[in-house]
Image (spheres, helix red, strand yellow):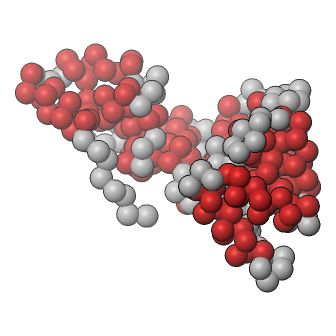
Amino acid sequence: MRWLDRVAAPRRPDVSEQMAAAHAAASCNDYAAALDIWGPLAHAGVARAQNNIGACFAEGFGVARDPALALRWITLAAAAGDPVGQRNLAAIYFNGNGVEPDYPRAAELYRAAAEQGDAPAQDMLSWMLLDGECIPPDPVEARRWALAAAEQGVASAMTRVGMLCHNALGIPRDPAEAARWWRRGAERGDADGQAMLGAACTMGSGVARDPVAALAWLLRAQASGSALAAPFLAAARAALDADGIAEAERRAAMPLPEVVP
């Protein structure tokens, strides 16, 4: 979770410069210096500074962890309309950090941040709408917010769009479009996207069958923690001889190429 962020819009001529200096200090793990800057700004009503102080109390950055103070400051930021504050407050209610879990309230806050263009909030709201355990499912809305997050480069959202295409949730089933989205997520490091692209390459679903690429993506996904890779690994290995397996392992061990946005 990205707890800390720059100020969205300066309220006074010098606020943006102070926030930039605080962000630079925090980026160097000098949270004491950052808090010295954020403190007066937060007390003056700068919402992003309030959020960042709350984040420090939540994570123990430069101060002792204090969930109550984290909630206080992040609530102020969210009430002032700061999208990062809204997203962070949503996470507090979703995870039950110092409060009782409240999934409808979390969804409400994620939506408020998402509507302001916050990509992580758009991604999380999409997940909640697709999962359907915390709030009523809505695959059409899930796709809408996944696409919004994907347009801002969120790899997990790209993978989710692929899942919606693959499972025909709110749209007709389209294996080629599913594979295209999985590839986008996979190339940007999303482990589940790598697993699903590997599965598609194993079966030739939406893409040409490619056993070496299949195993390479599945191995990369497994190494990154995706549970989706395991059901396909045996079939992917069985389709290759020793040389093919070695080539797949070589590819899987290489860093991902940089993706041009």
Q: Give the residue displayed 45% in from the left and 27% down from the top.
A: 225
Q: Give the residue displayed 38% in from the left and 26% down from the top.
A: 222
Q: Give the residue displayed 77% in from the left and 36% down from the top.
A: 64
Give residue 4's position: percent from left, percent from top: 68, 53
Give residue 1's position: percent from left, percent from top: 64, 43
Residue sitting farthest toward the bottom: 13
Residue 142 is left or right of residue 181, and the answer is right
Q: Give the residue displayed 66% in from the left and 69% down from the top.
A: 20
Front residue of 156/166: it is 156
Using the image, determine if residue 244 lies above or below residue 120: above
Front residue of 202/216: it is 216
Using the image, determine if residue 123 lies above or below residue 127: below
Q: Residue 243's image quarter?
A: top left
Quadrant for the C terminus, please: bottom left
Front residue of 196/95: it is 95
Give residue 227's position: percent from left, percent from top: 46, 22
Give residue 85's position: percent from left, percent from top: 80, 53
Using the image, determine if residue 32 lies above or below residue 40: above
